[in-house]
Amino acid sequence: MSLIDKSAAEVRRGSSYPAPFDGPCRNRSRCRLAAAGGLTQFGVNELTLPPGAWSSQRHWHSHEDEFVIVLSGEAALVTEAGETVLRAGDCAAFPAGRPDGHHLINRSGVDVVILEVGSDRSGEDQTVYSDIDMTVGPGDAPFRRKSDSQPNAGPGEPATSPA
C-alpha cells in the first residue's frame, strides 16, 4: 500500500480555459491524488469549490468516463435534464461518448468538497463544451471553436479536468 501525503500532492488552482470562459472556475482547486500516488491509468482529484465556483464549463467527453461523489457540502449538478442538488454521499456518473454536458456549481455559502474520478489516459479523448463555442482534444490539441475549428488561447486541461 502506498499512503498518499495529501499535503505534498500537487494542487491546481483556477482554470486554463481561455477568457472569458475561465471566470466561473477561477476559484476552484484540485488536489491531484492519483498523480501523487503514482497512478497512471486513471485520475482522482479532490475538488474544492468555494461559494459561487463552478467545477468546469458544462461538458462531456468522447472517451473518458467520469464519476463524482460529494464528500462535504452541496452542489448543483447541471445537465441537459436540468439541475439536481447533490449532498454529501451523493454520487453521479458520466459515461464516455454520451453527449450530456454536465458540471457542478456551488450555490451555497460554504465550500463543497468533491472526489472526481476519470478514466481516459489514452490521449484520444475530446471534450465538447455544451453551452459555449469550444472544444479541446484529442491529446494535447489546444482549445478551439466548434464553429470553425480555429484554436483558442490556452492549453487543454488534463483528464479529470474536466473537466
Image (cartoon, rainbow, N blue to C red):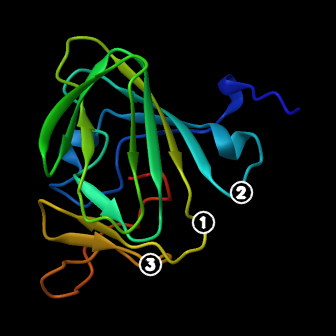
Front residue of this view, candidates 40 and 24? 40
Q: Is residue 64 left or right of residue 100?
A: right
| Mark closest to the chain's N terminus, 1 or 3 | 1
Q: Nearer the viewer, residue 52 or 20?
A: 52
Tell me how far mark 2 sits from mark 1, CA to CA. Answer: 7 Å
Label 3 sits on a secondary structure element that is loop
Residue type for callout 1: Arg
The answer to the question of whether label 2 and label 1 lie on touching residues, with beta carbons closer than 8 A, is yes
Q: Position of residue 84 (x, y in %)?
A: 19, 31
Query: Answer yes or no: do the residues labelled 1 and 3 have beta carbons within 8 Å?
Result: no
Q: Which residue, given by chain and number where applicable, does mark 3 sit on? A: 138
Q: Is residue 128 left or right of residue 123?
A: left
In percent of width and height, residue 150 lies at: 22, 86
Q: Secondary structure at mark 2?
A: loop
Give the residue pinned by disc 2: 40
Residue tagged 1: 121
Q: Earlier in the sequence, mark 2 or mark 1?
A: 2
Pick the residue in front: 141 or 119.
Answer: 119
